[in-house]
Image (spheres, rainbow, N blue to C red):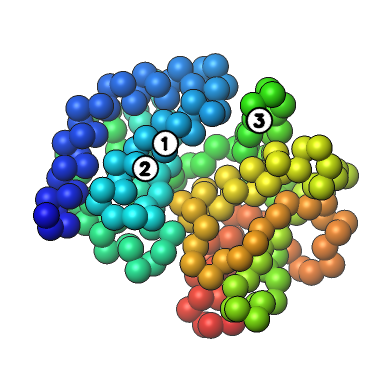
């Protein structure tokens, strides 16, 4: 089966499931059931894996309009992601894009015990650390508040950092190593707004620095 056939098979599946995906998304948003929303995204991602491994999914919307973004964290996969979007069917309540144009104002994560952490995008900054011996580059996200990223909520802070990467790239891009969210007071480096993350990473990749 060629690439176009796999792309069309995905869209055939999606068209048959889109009503259930919309209703599941709305239920999850209304109930703030973040694990259910993650399962929904993973369900779409599992079908995308039949096209090619590594593509990422983002969902947004509500009411009568929904957006499915299909992203390629690895630039080498961008051609198949672009072709996949070009073959998308005209579904009246959906738009299909390569990114979510208007990300939510907050990152909201919740664990299995119901503990929730809300972080405003506008409050997050980032910096890159020097390359490691293997060439990978770590990313440090910062918040101007006091918290213990190694305490009993460390999994929530790491989940926020993961969501920030998903929003920027769809997932962890090749060459990016570890990442963390820490208090701004821990970081002496110059930082940038998180809205500049994707552009800064692309510039670093293109210049090889």
Real-space Cα separation, disc 2 to disc 3, in angstroms: 21 Å
Q: At x 54% / y 16%, what residue is drawn?
A: 31
Q: How many marks?
A: 3
Residue at (49% x, 33% y) in the render:
38
Which x, y percent locates residue 51?
25, 51
Q: CA distance from mark 1 to mark 2?
A: 6 Å
Where residue 203 appears, as percent x and y from the top left, is: 53, 74
Q: Identify the residue under disc 1.
A: 41
In contact (CB < 8 Å): disc 1 and disc 2: yes
User: Around disc 2, counting alpha carbons within 10 Å, would you say few (fewer than 14), some (14 to 19), or many (20 or more)?
Assistant: some
The residue that disc 3 covers is: 111
Residue 50, x across and y down, in percent: 26, 48
Q: Quadrant of residue 148?
A: top right
Mark 1 Cα-neighbour bin, 10 Å: few <14, some 14–19, many ≥20: some
Residue 188 to residue 131: above or below: above
Left/right of residue 165 with respect to residue 44 in the rendered view: right
Residue at the spot x=39%, y=67% of the render? 75
Label 2 SS: helix
Element under disc 1: helix
Residue tagged 2: 45
Q: Which of these two is toward me, 78 or 49? A: 49
Report which quarter residue 193 is drawn in. bottom right
Classify 54 as above or below 66: below
- Res. 195 visible in picture: yes
What residue do we see at 15% from left, 45% from top?
8
Label 1 to label 3, Cα distance in Å?
A: 17 Å
Residue in the foreground of this view, choosing between 147 and 121 = 147
């Amino acid at each position: 089966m060629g690439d176009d056939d796999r792309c069309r098979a995905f869209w055939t599946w999606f068209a048959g499931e889109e009503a259930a995906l919309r209703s599941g998304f709305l239920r999850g948003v209304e109930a703030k059931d973040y694990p259910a929303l993650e399962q929904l995204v993973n369900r779409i991602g599992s079908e995308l894996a039949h096209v090619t491994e590594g593509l990422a999914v983002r969902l947004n919307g509500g009411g009568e309009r929904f957006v499915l973004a299909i992203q390629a964290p690895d630039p080498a996969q961008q051609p198949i992601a672009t072709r996949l979007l070009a073959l998308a069917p005209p579904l009246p309540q959906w738009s299909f894009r390569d990114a979510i144009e208007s990300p939510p104002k907050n990152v909201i994560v919740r664990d299995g015990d119901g503990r929730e952490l809300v972080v405003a995008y506008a409050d997050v900054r980032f910096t890159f650390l020097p390359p490691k011996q293997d060439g990978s580059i770590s990313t440090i996200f910062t918040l101007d508040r006091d918290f213990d990223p190694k305490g009993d909520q460390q999994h929530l802070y790491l989940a926020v950092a993961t969501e920030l990467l998903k929003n920027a790239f769809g997932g962890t891009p090749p060459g990016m190593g570890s990442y963390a969210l820490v208090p701004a007071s821990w970081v002496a480096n110059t930082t940038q707004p998180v809205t500049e993350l994707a552009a800064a990473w692309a510039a670093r990749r293109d210049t090889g620095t």
